[in-house]
Image: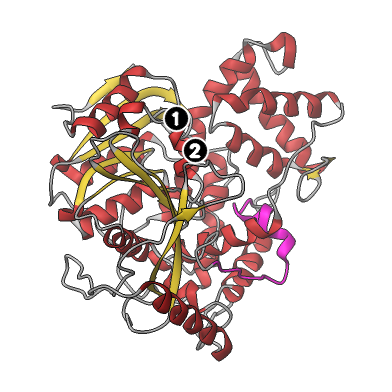
Amino acid sequence: MPHVRTPKPRIRTLMAFLALSTAAVIATGIAAPLVEATGIPVAAVTSTVAWQPCGGKADPRQECGSVSVPMDYAVPAGARISLAVSRVRAAGPDRHGVLLFIPGGPGSTGLGKPGELAGRLPAEVLARYDVVSFDPRGLGKSSPVDCRPASPGKASAQLMPWPGPDGDIAPNVSWAAEMATACGEEENPLTAHISTRNEARDIDAIRAALGEEKLSYWGVSYGTYVGAVYATMYPDRTDRVVLDSNDDPDPGRLARGWAANYAIGAEDRFPDFAAWAAARDAEYHLGVHAAAVRDAFLTLATRLDGAPLPWTGAQPPTLDGNALRAAMLQALYSDKSFPGFAALMSAALRGEPLPAASAPPAAALQNTAAVLTATICNDVRWPRSVDGYAEDVATNRAAYPLTAGMPVNIYACAFWPEPSEDPVTVSPDGPANVLMIQNLRDPSTPYVGALRMRAAFGDRARMVTVDAGGHGSYLANGNACGDGAVTAFLVTGERPADDVSCR
């Protein structure tokens, strides 16, 4: 098995970070150090944010700024990085505070979110909060990292480690080792310090820079785990906490468990698509019953494993079995994606030209891959046995054919240095100010994982369960019951007395 050492940072790269920190200190000044609830000294942060128009295509109400934080919180006087932040100020005179949007991923940006959310959030929420978000460290405009693997074109196809048609994981093992080397400290000193713990520390630095004693926030997907970690590390600094589409917080697995949950989530959610397509068999010809649509998908995926089709706009530009499976998972995130995926399946089955695909920019994919890899590998120790992954893939393929073993396959973390800190165990200790909202049939963060988050918080939390499919619940499904419960909590601070089921 390949071994990845932990080299020292290159001097010129470290000097670049030091130069950045010097400029940030000169520009903004430094406030007093923060202290974690655990007693660990954190770091001096910028005393204020110098807000200015974001420019470009941003909502004109949105302002942008930055917060300077340590690259390594264990060395608060050392190299610093910059966090890009943005806000839309409260629209009414009765301002309650800040509502921070915590993006998902790991690897999703948040800088454009306040302007977007200003067009979606209810007026009574916008009246009471400055809506704020940020690009997490290493991502977007927050001191971005780029792992620069030897095979950069693979990034799109390998963000999810799909095994070969026969379950072979040898190419995945090779790619995982390549990413671990490319993301090592020698080229990217910041990657050793990208973790959920440090994102929570960054959020607290943002809170302090905004001059807020307490913080309300809305975490979505991976952002729910970030929000849960913040609520555990800094319980007395939380105000109104909304966690939407919840990750399983099991501290022994974390991202490894989240990946494995794709197998469960796909099985929970695919019947929604199958029923939808069966009701439209005259248009798509995928089967008149949900079971027939499932069979059509599995048959087509197997066919494409052996005989891929050209696919304009995709990267790489072919539709093989794994590309179809990846497109299926993406389509399950929202009912709005059902027609496009059904059209893709229909064209492939009938030998017609495939609808054109669109691939994200290569640079953005590289950045996402780097932050994703660093976060999931620094949060928790992953198994090292290649044979163990191969066995897990074989078992998982048989049990969950929709996802073909991908959810339990190998990542760069198998070749990553040991994490420098223990995982955070989400705690029931703290104020009872957490409201969770969760779809019953979420393909990415399934209901079973949300139940574990609910159990970890104990009486600190209440959960609103929405009888809906897709990823993202608040303001995403048109469910008046679920949306109303969250809005009321944000406006009044009052949670439901008990868990709520919105059917």
- The picture quadrant where one finds residue 282 is top right
Does residue 470 appear left or right of residue 98 in this picture?
Answer: right
Q: Is residue 320 visible?
A: yes
In the picture, the quarter occupied by the N terminus is: bottom right
- The picture quadrant where one finds residue 202 is bottom left
- Residue 383 vs residue 444, the one in the foreground: 444
Residue 482, image x, y percentages: 32, 24
Q: Is residue 385 visible?
A: no
What kind of residue is marked 1?
Arg
Residue 396, image x, y percentages: 52, 45
The residue tagged 1 is 120
Does residue 173 appear left or right of residue 272 in this picture?
Answer: right
Magenta region, main secondary structure? loop
**Residue 53 against residue 290 in the figure, above or below:** below
Q: Which dot marks residue 116?
A: 2
Residue 116, image x, y percentages: 49, 38
Q: Residues within 10 Å of mark 1 (few under 14, many from 20)?
A: few
Are circles 2 and 1 on residues that touch, CB within 8 Å? yes
Q: Which element type, helix, strand or loop, lies under badge 1?
A: loop
**Residue 179 against residue 290 in the figure, above or below:** below
Magenta residues (range): 144-162
Does residue 193 appear left or right of residue 457 in this picture?
Answer: right
Q: Which element type, helix, strand or loop, lies under badge 2?
A: helix
In the picture, the quarter occupied by the C terminus is: top left
Q: Which dot marks residue 177?
A: none
**Residue 473 against residue 406 in the figure, above or below:** above
